[in-house]
Image (cartoon, helix red, strand yellow):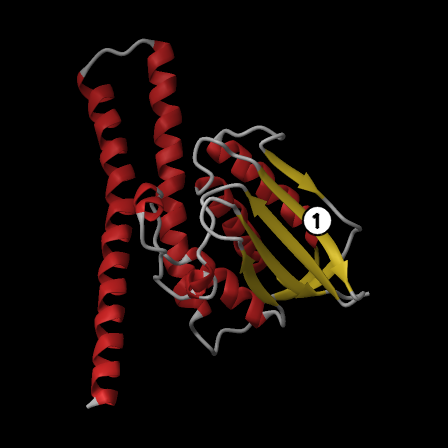
């Protein structure tokens, strides 16, 4: 009876997570599509001056990028889940990947170099799938900025560990994480319950992708936080090559 109860509770939780994922993905797909359609209909039915038309185009491009980002997250999760899928391995200069991701997030969220600071350590090279590594780095930085709200103070830095690994640390001053949630947040579809998760839209796939990429590349990822209101640090550690 105890075992049956445990399995039943797990099934209920899993179904709830799946429902939350479907609702989140539906929202993330419908919202930009509805926005793009509204602006297109406006352009089609009304005379719009040049300045306003350019503004409409800019918003539609941003909505398109948001839409593509959601689709890519879902597709990437499926690809990573295929154990038979081989990595497209090459030598990667990690600093260059981080710089691209930092610049992308600054542009996407319209934050300054002071709000999102990058402090590179010594140059290091890793071996791995460039597309997957970039996705993992981008997810960590993007999450830190999104969960910071209006007061973005995010630091991205790297350091070598024992000459064998490179540790990418992404630190924010956001809402923090309960100790009991530090491991759960890397599960597929999982989102920390509460007001913050309601305010920040997402699919619950980003950190799962980061963990999967780390594992496939012989590394690991973990989160550190002193608790609610005290920010968080996410650490992605990957092996380096000489």
Residue 70 on image: x %, y %: 37, 49
Label 1 neighbourhood size at 10 Å, few (<14), some (14-19), many (20+)?
Answer: many
In this view, the residue in front, 178 or 9, is 178
Q: Is residue 45 left or right of residue 205?
A: left
- Residue extending farthest top: 49
Q: Is residue 103 left or right of residue 44?
A: right
| Residue that mark 1 sits on | 95
Residue at 37% x, 19% y is 55
Residue at 38% x, 11% y is 51
Does residue 130 appear in this view? Answer: no
Residue at 49% x, 32% y is 151
Query: Looking at the image, is 10 positioned above or below residue 17?
Result: below
Residue 39 on image: x %, y %: 26, 25
In this view, the residue in front, 115 or 240, is 115
Residue 210 on image: x %, y %: 51, 60
Q: Secondary structure at mark 1?
A: helix
């Amino acid at each position: 009876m105890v075992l049956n109860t445990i399995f039943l509770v797990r099934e209920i939780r899993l179904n709830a997570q799946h429902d939350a994922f479907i609702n989140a993905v539906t929202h993330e797909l419908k919202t930009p599509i509805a926005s793009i359609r509204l602006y297109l209909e406006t352009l089609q039915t009304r005379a719009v001056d040049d300045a306003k038309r350019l503004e409409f185009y800019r918003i539609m491009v941003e909505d398109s990028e948001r839409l593509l980002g959601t689709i890519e997250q879902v597709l990437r999760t499926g690809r990573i889940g295929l154990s038979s899928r081989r990595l497209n391995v090459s030598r990667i200069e990690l600093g260059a990947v981080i710089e691209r991701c930092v610049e992308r997030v600054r542009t996407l969220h319209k934050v300054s170099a002071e709000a999102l600071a990058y402090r590179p350590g010594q140059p290091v090279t890793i071996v791995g799938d460039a597309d997957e590594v970039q996705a993992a780095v981008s997810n960590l930085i993007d999450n830190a900025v999104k969960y910071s709200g209006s007061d973005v103070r995010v630091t991205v830095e790297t350091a070598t560990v024992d000459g064998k690994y490179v540790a990418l640390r992404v630190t924010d001053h956001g809402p923090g994480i309960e100790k009991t949630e530090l491991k759960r947040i890397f599960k597929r579809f999982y989102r920390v319950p509460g007001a913050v998760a309601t305010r920040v839209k997402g699919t619950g796939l980003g950190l799962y992708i980061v963990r999967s990429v780390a594992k496939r590349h012989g590394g690991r990822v973990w989160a550190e936080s002193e608790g609610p209101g005290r920010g968080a640090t996410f650490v992605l550690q990957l092996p380096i090559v000489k």
